[in-house]
Image: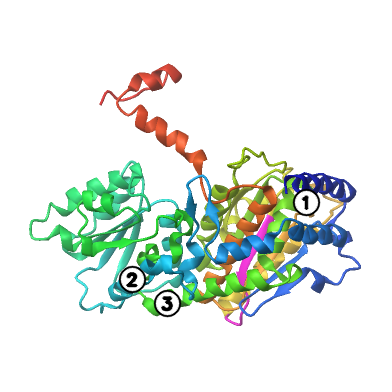
Amino acid sequence: MNKIRSEIKNNLSSFGKKLYGSHISELRKDSNLNDYSVTTSLANFDYSKNRINQESLNYLLEALDSLEVRKSLKELFEGETKNPTENQYVSHTIYRNKNFNENYKSILSERDKMKSFLESSLEKRPFKNLICISIGGSRLGPELLYEFQSLSDPVKVFFCSSYDLLELKDTLKSLKQKDTVIFISSKSFQTSEILKNLSYVKSWLKRDPTSNIDDHLYAISSNTAAMASHDIPKDNQFVILDSLGGRYSVWSSMSIPGFINSDFECYLDFLEGASLADKYTLNEPWRNNISAIMALLSVWNSNALKINNHAVFTYNFRLRSLTKYIAQLSMESNGKSINHKFYESPFNTSPLIWGGYGIELQHSVFQWLLQGKTESSCDFIGVNNDSEESFDSHKMLLSQVIALTEGKKDKVDPYKSIEGNTPCSVLQINTLNLRSLGFIMALYEHKTFIEAIILGLDPFDQWGVQLGKNLVFTSKTNNKFFEEHFPQVFLPKC
């Protein structure tokens, strides 16, 4: 496999040199644009505005078979894929798979517990506010779900994680203990940011002697011992599998804060969308497979065209946090260079993923994107339906794609000229609902996994982030450690 990867890398460089200087408008001049699009019942994908030709694309599609990607996907969906550096089987797809393995019966019992909590009537709930103390995937997924549903029901949800506690303190200023429940969401229940916020919020709850803290404190984690040691009542503990990665935990009870104002059926709709994406990605031919094509384009842009960053722009306000979710998923999975077998990938690996809500960013970064000298590639995600708000936003989306790819020359005022030629793909959701959201989120998961296979990486660990954390812990009571490195930096004497 490693020899095949080296050959692919070398061939990509050759293809890239052939296309150097080619413009997207010329590449598609005599093409049938439908040959560069994929249609499904939930979403459509148009990649006709990419700087790639059929010869290069055909080669990449064939490379997926030479790397046995279909076999790897089958293992993933059957729960047989392993995270080798942590000696754990990967379980996120099992959470939305109706054919449960015997080893995952605990998922069903936790699902029943989640259902019971969500289906308790709002009138009987003794709270008006929910604070979710979480960070990374434990926050990004539930926060996206909460924003996406845009519900105006009684429970207000706040997400807090700042290490300086300012986010939490500002939130608590307007809340009362008797009206508030706290969810501590952390896979390990050992993250310093989470424990610091937990300590503070517990002291806040105790300031009201009329409230029983056990009625207000819940937790979601794989570490039952840690939850118990921090005084979380057993009945208030939601347990996820230790094999479930944080950035994939949205499919579990970790998403409770995101569904607190809806119901369990909404959660099941979300899972159903992801399950449909699993079946689709496993069975669909590569040429009609959105996840596979997105993965190939990522590798192509990074290695053939040497583009080191990729923007994801959403054109519906309910999807405004999707970019942050995709960014963590992509870069924490594939922002690496070497795997557990000491194999160093010959490819440029994950590009920088950035972006956000496109309507706002048009008034900031798009100037740089349209006329700057740094190349980027882009995904545009929108909703294509008959509603007035979606229709207007979608026209805005398509206009920006045309500007970025086609450009426009101005011989009279050259400072107005736009080169264009920015590779862009468009992912359209047909209906703005939880099933469609689950579908496209899972597509990006599979895109990331397929990309990892091509690159030769282990996508389910994140050892790179540990060094900075460990340095904080080893030097917590030793300011001299920092003074040796930063003699001019003031450190408080506390």
- Element under disc 3: helix
Q: Which residue is mark 2?
A: 109
What amino acid is labelled 3 in the image?
A: Cys
Circle nearer the viewer, 1 or 2: 2
Q: Which residue is mark 1?
A: 416
Residue farthest toward the bottom in the current orientation of the protein = 386
Q: Is residue 250 above or below residue 452?
A: below
Q: Quadrant of residue 64?
A: bottom right
- For the residue pair 373 and 210, the one nearer the viewer reads as 210
Report whether 259 appears left or right of 226: right
* Residue 382 forms part of the magenta stretch: yes
Q: How many marks?
A: 3
Which residue is at a point 61% across and 41% down the rendered structure image?
341
What amino acid is labelled 1 in the image?
A: Lys
* Residue 402 place in picture, x, y as percent: 75, 63
* Residue 367 place in picture, x, y as percent: 67, 50
Q: Which residues are magenta?
A: 378-387
- Element under disc 1: helix
Sooner in the amino-acid sequence: mark 1 or mark 2: 2
Question: Can residue 307 be seen by looking at this rendering?
Answer: yes
Q: Which residue is mark 3?
A: 266
Residue farthest toward the left in the current orientation of the protein = 209
Report whether 301 appears left or right of 157: right
Q: Is residue 231 above or below residue 102?
A: above
